[in-house]
Image (cartoon, coloured by chain):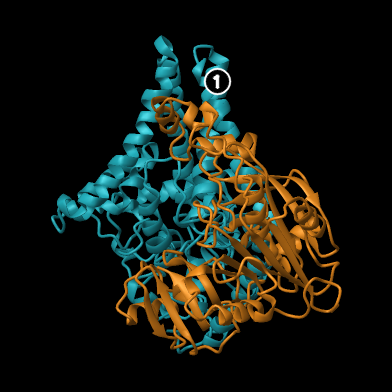
Amino acid sequence: MTTATPAPPQAPPLDLAARPTTNPYGLTSEQFEQLGEEMNAIRQRVLADRGQRDADYIRGIVRAQRGLEVAGRGLLWAGVVPPFWLAGTAALSLSKILDNMEIGHNVMHGQYEWMNDPKLSGKQFEWDTACPADQWRHSHNYMHHTHTNIVGKDRDIGYGILRMSEEQPWKPYYLGNPLWAALLATFFEYGVALHDLEVERIAAGEISLMDKRELLKGIGTKVRAQALKDYVFFPALSGPLFAFPLAGNATANIVRNLWSFTIIFCGHFPEGTHEFDEAEAAEETRGQWYHRQLLGSANLSGSRLFHILSGNLSFQIEHHLFPDLPANRYAEISVEVREICERYGLPYNVGPLHRQFGSVVKKIGRLALPSSAALSPGRLARGIGGAVAKGGRLLRPRLSLSRS
Amino acid sequence: MSPQLLPRRSLRFLEAVTTPHGVDSYLEQIDPLLVAGECRGEVVGVERGTADSATLTLRPNRAWQGFRAGQFLNVAVEIDGVRHQRCYSPACAEHRRRDDFPPYKGTFGPSAIEITAKRHPEGLVSNFLVERAEPGMVVGLSAGEGDFQLPERRPESVLLIGGGSGITPLMAILRTLFAEGYEHPVALLYYTPDAERCIYREELERLAAAHPNFQLLRSYTRAPGTGELDGHFSPTHLPEAEPCFADAETFACGPPALLDAVRGTWANGLEHRLHVESFVPPTFVPVGAAGEGTIRFAGPEVEVANSGASLLEQAEAAGLSPAYGCRMGICHTCTCRKRAGTHKNLITGEVSSAPDEEIQLCVSAALGDLTVEL
């Protein structure tokens, strides 16, 4: 799968068209091999080093989440008092964010399975959101992580309702791209829950709702339990003042939705991330797989608290290279990954939230319109988007923008 | 807050408002013993009787289901972040049931469980307990397990044969019987290298002095002439024991050599009287080469000769269809529990012989015999 025309990695030619999209930085097959070994070595070292500090970390986060939730529910019970409502809604929002991101997402990846604690087992964990955990494990751990950024396989590209790639043929429906994105962000937990439903295939008549009966039943049960808790039982505890906890719970769910949408869309769609097609990814070596994960992901820079609240998905690159290493290790691994990228002449896409999300928003807007002829696929390194081709610059310069 | 003390409807409401994590996951943040759905015990006493053993007294929480004298418990401890589980036989009497107290009717109230851990070269958990157990530590507990147990209808006579730390389940039987005022004949044949390693020596002597129906026969195998018997177990030791061994319900627990000798003696139509528990440090399955041994897929109960390929491929070749995803060790869809055996992670090269371990079928190969739950 590697290119037969090994370009020296230190000085890649500027002619984008000459380079296959699978290997835009011209790595030789030996380099792919070495890259695979270096990445495996990092993985191996962390695996051997997992222990009490990782166990203490995740238990500490669980403890914080439970505490925030109890505090949030308690304050919202008396939500008629405005400061209580505000504090309660904030605490519950944080609780849901921690539950879904740093705990749920990471535990369900099996990052803490080595602890042999049934409560932190990836297969048994259930989270505080509309999507049933077992469906998520399939659509996310398998479909998205194995087929990262492969248009047509990775359903995280647009969730079946957005146009997030030039590779998705334009149709008038996509004029609403920004609107659909705003709706998806607001109701993101339901978007995630309906992920595996493949709504676009149902709309196209390829499959019928009946084919998805079992799936719908699972979603129905989970959504019902979540809705009863947040919109019936807890409000009911406040008696005639039920409207305050009800509004607080709804707000917390939406805050969590907007936050997780923002973080997740910054993982693979900022300018500079690559896309791949199925044929390109077939038969790839481990080294090439690492390479695809590297090029298809983007990081966010920020404080330690920011990383925790993002579920360490701010280290999306490290997460995609090592999806089952404990997330609390990504920060330290990132130093090595970056150094490796520099040595191989590969981009390491990192930026602050406002810049990365800004470029995602731009992309959502741009893709609402049909692609111009100048941007026809095949001439471009896909997914670099118009900007790179137009500017005629490589991704490498992004390194200079990145945080040290 | 015992679940039995709460009306069903309140309990259902509590579950509904704590979904999806459940009431226990909040209660355990206050105190790990408060959980109702999982049995845990707090270490309340540690006695290091000898240099290489520790006797722990555990106070179980309200989820404790009790045990029958002779049975073992699975005790789970966390060492460097990893939960390990091993079997220990309690040495205490099985009672302390609180059937007679109305709030606890039909349940077991708080009681104390006594287990003894003994150091041995491969004994990760036992060594941890011997060195590090201290009051306040919380361990996971199972209910009593195993068929090796004193029948509920007490036998007419009882013969106990023990070796080394195999005394613990026999001690539970003795203590249970005498606590009930058992008046029929009981004999104990107990084999240890010397008097120092005779666990419960003082208590056994006290019991023998207090109960004329209890015959204590010890053999110190490395110090002939100092015990009531000499040498390792042999059928000639039996006539010493009253009642005649053929009539007695017999319970034997100890190292494999002792049990083999006992089984040989009972292999003459008396097998139904003999109950045996092997009580040895976990013997580590010798690490075989890839492509050797037998793989057993527990659940569907299918056995295949190990070809050396990944467990997932071998399961599929055997016509089974375990869940899988990426087939490259990323997604953990195919994670299953390995019960026993040694496996090698084909990506990391890591080799592990730990029992009861979650493994990924798609990137694990068996080295020698292996049992995995599908």
Q: Residues within 10 Å of mark 1 (few under 14, many from 20)?
A: many
Chain identifier matching the orange colour in the rendered picture: B
According to the image, label 1 marks what residue? A75
Which percent across, then down, holds residue B95? 60, 44
Which percent across, then down, holds residue B104? 53, 31
Residue type pointed to by label 1: Leu
Q: Quadrant of the N terminus of chain A?
A: bottom left
- The structure residue drawn at horizontal position 77% and vertical position 67%, both measured from the top left corner, is B119
Chain identifier matching the cyan colour in the rendered picture: A
Occupied quadrant, residue B327: bottom left
Q: Quadrant of the C terminus of chain A?
A: bottom right
| Vertical relation: A323 (above or below) A186 | below
Q: Across the whole image, how many numbered discs are drawn on residues?
A: 1
Along the line of sight, the residue nearer the viewer: A113 or B187: B187
Along the line of sight, the residue nearer the viewer: B82 or A107: B82
Q: Farthest residue toward the top?
A: A240
Occupied quadrant, residue A402: bottom right
Along the line of sight, the residue nearer the viewer: A25 or B262: B262
- The structure residue drawn at horizontal position 46% and vertical position 65%, both measured from the top left corner, is B335
Occupied quadrant, residue A205: bottom left
| Vertical relation: A121 (above or below) A339 | above
Q: Chain of mark 1?
A: A
Position of residue B300 in the picture relative to residue A200 (left or right): right
Whether residue B80 is visible here, answered yes or no, is: no
User: What secondary structure is found at the residue carrying circle 1?
Assistant: helix
| Vertical relation: A393 (above or below) B12 | below
Position of residue B217 in the picture relative to residue A77 (left or right): right
Which percent across, then down, holds residue A14? 50, 75
- The structure residue drawn at horizontal position 35% and vertical position 35%, both measured from the top left corner, is A225
